[in-house]
C-alpha cells in the first residue's frame, strides 16, 4: 500500500489549538461497518455503544515532561532533547535538534548543570543514546526543567499540563500522550462501569514510533519501533474470558483503537 493513499486535505482551521473545557464534549465519528452509515456525535455518546459484559481496556501510561532545552558544553550552542525510552540505568534513547553536531563524547547541559547528558552512541534520523548525570530523582529534575512534548501542529503553549494526560494516567514513561484516551472523564468512566462494562488497564509507553516519519513509499516496508508494555495476569484473564464470549461481547482498546 503506497503512502500517497493516505493523503487527504486537512484545513488548519480544523486543528484545535486548545482543549475543550469538557473533555467528553469532543466530536465523535461513528461508522456502521455493515451499512456504511456515518453519525457525527459527541464523545460522551460512546456509552451507547457498550453493552454489559464488554471490556474496555485503557492505557494508563503517563506522559513525561520529556522535552529539554539546553546548551552544548563545548560550544554553548542551543540544543533541544526529547527523551524517548530508558535503555538501562541512566542511559536513554533520545531525539536531538540539531543532531548532526552531537557526537560521541559530547555533553549537553540542562538547567545550569542540574542534568548533564553525555552522548555514548549515535543512531540514525537524529537518534542518540545519552547517559544522564544528575543529583536526586530524575522525575523531579524533569518536573523542574522539562516541558510536555506537544505535537508540532499544536502552536499554543499548554496552560495546564494535566490536560495532556488522561484522567487515569499512572505509570510515567511516555514521550507523547495516548490521545484517544484524553476524551474520557471520571464521570463518563463511572457511567460506563455502572452499565456493567469491565474496565481494565495495560501500560504501553509511547516512544520513537510516534515521532519517526514514514520514509518509504510502501507502508509494508516501514520498520516500526518497539515500545515497552506491561499487562497483569488479572487483565490477561479478564480479556481471555471476554474473548471466549466474543459472540456477544467486545473488547475496546484505548489508545489502541481497534475492536477485537
Image: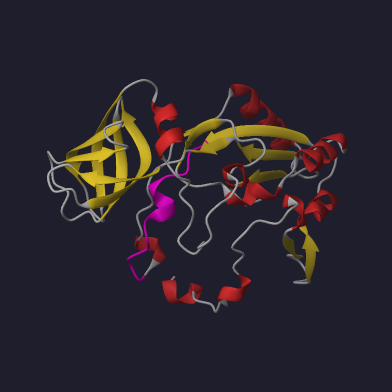
Relative to 173, is 135 on the left or the right?
Answer: left
User: Most extreme residue toward the top, as rendered?
Assistant: 136
**Scheme of image coloration:** secondary structure
Residue 21 image point, x, y percent: 73, 53
User: Most extreme residue toward the front, as rendered?
Assistant: 112
Q: Quadrant of residue 193?
A: top right
Residue 218 image point, x, y percent: 37, 68
Q: Is residue 260 visible?
A: no
Relative to 238, is 128 on the left or the right?
Answer: left
| Residue at the image position 38 percent from the left and 27 percent from the top | 138
Q: Is residue 74 visible?
A: yes
Q: Quadrant of residue 37?
A: bottom right
Instruction: Decide: is 101 above or below 198.
Output: below
Q: Is residue 98 magenta?
A: no
Residue 8 image point, x, y percent: 53, 77
Closer to us: 77 or 244: 77
Residue 118 image point, x, y percent: 20, 36
Instruction: Decide: is 33 above or below 92.
Output: below
Boundaries of the magenta span: 204-217
| Residue at the image position 53 percent from the left and 60 percent from the top | 156
Amino acid at each position: 500500500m503506497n503512502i500517497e493513499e493516505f493523503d487527504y486535505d486537512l484545513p488548519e482551521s480544523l486543528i484545535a489549538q486548545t482543549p475543550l473545557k469538557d473533555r467528553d464534549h469532543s466530536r465523535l465519528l461513528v461508522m456502521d461497518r455493515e451499512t456504511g452509515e456515518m453519525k457525527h456525535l459527541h464523545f460522551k455518546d460512546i456509552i451507547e455503544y457498550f453493552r454489559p459484559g464488554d471490556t474496555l481496556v485503557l492505557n494508563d501510561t503517563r506522559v513525561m515532561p520529556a522535552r529539554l532545552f539546553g546548551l552544548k558544553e563545548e560550544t554553548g550552542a542551543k540544543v533541544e532533547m526529547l527523551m524517548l525510552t530508558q535503555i538501562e540505568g541512566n542511559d536513554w534513547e533520545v531525539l536531538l535538534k540539531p543532531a548532526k553536531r552531537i557526537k560521541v563524547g559530547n555533553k549537553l547541559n540542562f538547567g545550569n548543570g542540574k542534568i548533564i547528558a553525555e552522548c555514548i552512541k549515535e543512531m540514525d534520523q537524529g537518534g542518540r543514546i545519552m547517559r544522564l548525570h544528575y543529583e536526586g530523582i530524575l522525575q523531579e529534575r524533569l518536573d523542574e526543567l522539562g516541558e510536555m512534548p506537544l505535537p508540532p501542529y499544536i502552536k499554543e503553549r499548554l496552560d495546564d499540563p494535566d490536560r495532556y494526560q488522561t484522567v487515569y494516567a499512572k505509570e510515567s514513561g511516555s514521550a507523547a500522550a495516548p490521545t484517544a484516551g484524553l476524551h474520557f472523564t471520571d464521570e463518563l468512566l463511572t457511567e460506563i462501569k455502572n452499565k456493567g462494562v469491565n474496565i481494565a488497564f495495560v501500560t504501553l509507553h509511547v516512544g520513537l514510533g510516534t515521532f519517526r516519519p514514514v520514509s518509504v513509499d510502501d507502508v509494508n516496508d516501514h520498520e516500526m519501533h518497539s515500545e515497552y508494555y506491561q499487562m497483569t495476569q488479572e487483565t490477561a484473564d479478564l480479556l481471555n474470558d471476554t474473548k471466549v464470549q466474543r459472540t456477544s461481547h467486545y473488547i475496546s482498546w484505548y489508545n489502541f483503537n481497534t475492536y477485537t
